[in-house]
């Protein structure tokens, strides 16, 4: 599914994942809130294939996973990787 904008992308990915972090598996379903000004206090939608080399996938919800802010930071720092089932190493989150 292709979202209309970044906010919808985030909402759709988080709802699809039932507000569970795909890095640490923590359940944020009871503490989740989304506010356009504050953004989300706990969760974000992380792009599996990076936006810069794959701008066409920026709003494609199949290219997103739900991560807590700690795991999202670890992904970008290179301290945590996530590889969805049946994905190649090229699609690994970094």
Image (cartoon, rainbow, N blue to C red):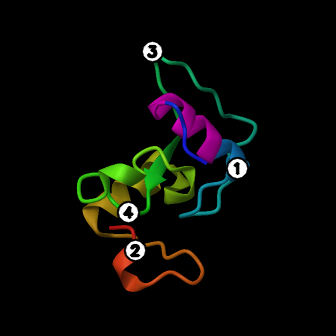
Q: Which residues are magenta?
A: 5-13
- In which image quadrant can residue 94 be found? bottom left
Residue at mark 3 = 37
Residue at mark 1 = 16
Residue at 47 percent across and 72 percent down: it is 82
Residue at 34 percent across and 79 percent down: it is 90
* Horizontal relation, residue 20 to residue 47: left or right: right
Numbered mark located on residue 91 in the image: 2
Q: Residues within 10 Å of mark 2 (few under 14, many from 20)?
A: some
The x and y percentages for residue 40 are 52, 30
Q: Residues within 10 Å of mark 1 (few under 14, many from 20)?
A: some
Residue 4 colored magenta?
no
Whole-number angstrom distance, CA of label 4 to CA of label 1: 18 Å
Along the polypeptide, which appears first: circle 4 or circle 1? Answer: 1
Is the residue under label 4 in contact with that under label 3 (CB below 8 Å)? no
- Element type at mark 3: loop
Q: Is residue 49 above or below residue 16?
A: below
Q: Residues within 10 Å of mark 3 (few under 14, many from 20)?
A: few
The answer, for residue 42, to whether it is visible in the render is no
Residue at 52 percent across and 31 percent down: it is 4
Q: Is residue 14 above or below residue 39?
A: below
Is the residue under label 4 in contact with that under label 2 (CB below 8 Å)? yes
Numbered mark located on residue 49 in the image: 4
- Element type at mark 1: helix
The x and y percentages for residue 22 are 58, 62
Whole-number angstrom distance, CA of label 2 to CA of label 1: 20 Å
In front: 52, or 33? 52
């Amino acid at each position: 599914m292709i979202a209309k904008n970044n906010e919808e992308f985030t909402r759709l990915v988080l709802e699809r994942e039932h507000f569970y972090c795909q890095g640490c598996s923590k359940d944020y379903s009871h503490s989740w809130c989304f506010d356009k000004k504050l953004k989300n206090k706990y969760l974000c939608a992380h792009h599996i294939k990076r936006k810069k080399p794959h701008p066409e996938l920026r709003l494609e919800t199949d290219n997103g996973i739900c991560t807590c802010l700690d795991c999202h930071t670890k992904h970008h720092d290179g301290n945590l990787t996530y590889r969805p089932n049946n994905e190649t190493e090229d699609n690994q989150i970094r």
